[in-house]
Amino acid sequence: AQTVTQSQPEMSVQEAETVTLSCTYDTSENNYYLFWYKQPPSRQMILVIRQEAYKQQNATENRFSVNFQKAAKSFSLKISDSQLGDTAMYFCAFTGIQGAQKLVFGQGTRLTINP
Amino acid sequence: DTAVSQTPKYLVTQMGNDKSIKCEQNLGHDTMYWYKQDSKKFLKIMFSYNNKELIINETVPNRFSPKSPDKAHLNLHINSLELGDSAVYFCASRLSGRNTEAFFGQGTRLTVV
């Protein structure tokens, strides 16, 4: 069964700092998709960034980038120049491309950006 | 236009009642999900439908029954509500087999008193 683990329940940094959120996963599939979602206090789930496992190049979206290490099954999220609006729960998620394609989430990391 | 819409947004009800949550997506996706988010924010998948067929049915009490009348709708009916059912329930949809994210509804906060 696929599992996703986020080992940092909470993190807190100062505005403008860089922060890295960790995520590891377990799967026997060779090709799959990985995502980071953000959930602000409004409760809405918002996609931050996505990565295809067969692409070696790390995905980037403005201030957000990932460090995808396929052999280590690691998918960390780096937020540069953090802003107050980045305060939210962050979820790492995995889906395979075979079978039922279950979208599995990690436990989440609560990130607080302090002024 | 809201891509994935759930109704109601809030639901407060007494133990033992039966309630339904509705979900509709206008994205043309073929796969829809129900997730339960508990007080610790953990998102646990409950059900998934692909083209109206149930493909994922996690260990969920049989008081929970999903219904997909067509590809654009996935409703969740809950019988004999219990205090432990209090949570936020999210509907989501996705196009299977592609590198596309799941789109989520705004969630339904269910409170059982």
Image (cartoon, rainbow, N blue to C red):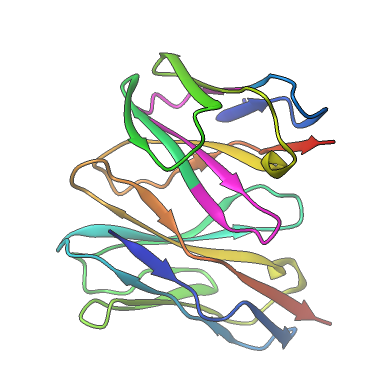
Q: Could you say which is closer to the camera, residue B12 or residue A53?
A: B12
Q: Position of residue B54 (x, y in %)?
A: 33, 26
Q: How many marks?
A: 0
Indicate whether B98 appears above or below A106.
above
Q: In which quadrant of the rendered image does the C terminus of chain A lie? A: bottom right
Q: Residue at x 68, y 69 (%)?
A: A86
Q: Position of residue A96 (x, y in %)?
A: 25, 53
Q: Is residue A109 visible?
A: yes
Left or right relative to A61: residue A85: right
Indicate yes or no whether the magenta region holds residue B96. Answer: no
Q: Residue furthest left?
A: A30
Q: Position of residue A52 (x, y in %)?
A: 27, 61
Can you tell which quarter of the image residue A15 is in?
bottom right
Indicate yes or no whether the magenta region holds residue B36. Answer: yes
Q: Is residue B73 visible?
A: no
Q: Residue at x 55, y 74 (%)?
A: A63
Indicate whether B35 appears above or below A56.
above
Q: Could you say which is closer to the camera, residue A96 or residue A77?
A: A96
Q: Position of residue A78 (x, y in %)?
A: 50, 80
Q: In which quadrant of the rendered image does the N terminus of chain A lie? A: bottom left
Left or right relative to B107: residue B47: left
Q: Which residues are magenta?
A: B21-44
Can you tell which quarter of the image residue B90 is in?
top right
